[in-house]
Image (tube, rainbow, N blue to C red):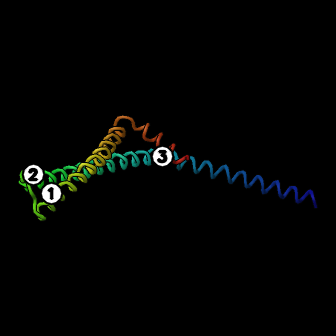
Amino acid sequence: MYKSMNEQMQKYSEELIEWVKLAAQDATKLVHQELPLFIQEYLSWYFYSNLLWAILGTVFLLTSLILFFKNLKAHSYVFEKDRLDAGETAKLLTIIVLGFFTIISSFNFGITTLGNIRDCLKVKIAPRLVLAEFAKKITK
């Protein structure tokens, strides 16, 4: 009884090992076939998504600056008066608040846009670095 059970376990072990070998070979073939396409698609996506964000950031930055300076120019007479009534005080406060948020958003979007442009250049200049960073990210 022990001998036949032992032989049966040996047979199942050999079948399992053979199945694992075939599965590993199939997986290796699949990886070798699909990996170059994956790398190309990943780098393209990384480049174009960063380019899109850089363009959107630049558009937002320019729009906010244009709106701020237009508003400032339209209400510049407020700065020339000695006394302000309630409506003019509200306009001045609006200019100050809009200016503050424009400066903060300009700084934030400027830094983000520069980072996106840097990442676009990194894909074109050093794609292996991008892939190494990706590999590091997914292995954490």
| Of the image marks 2 and 1, the number of the one nearer the N terminus | 2
Q: Secondary structure at mark 1?
A: helix
Foreground residue among 89 and 57: 89
Residue at point 33%, 51% (across, down): 49
Mark toward the viewer: 3 or 1: 1
Tell me if label 2 and label 1 are in contact, CB under 8 Å.
Answer: yes
Residue at point 58%, 51% (across, down): 26
With 28 as the anchor, is 117 left or right in this view?
left
Mark 3: which amino acid? Leu
Badge 3 is on which residue? 35
Q: Residues within 10 Å of mark 1 (few under 14, many from 20)?
A: some
Residue at point 93%, 58% (across, down): 2
The number of numbered badges drawn on the structure is 3
Badge 2 is on which residue? 79
Q: Position of residue 96 (x, y in %)?
A: 19, 54
Q: Position of residue 5 (x, y in %)?
A: 88, 59
Badge 1 is on which residue? 92
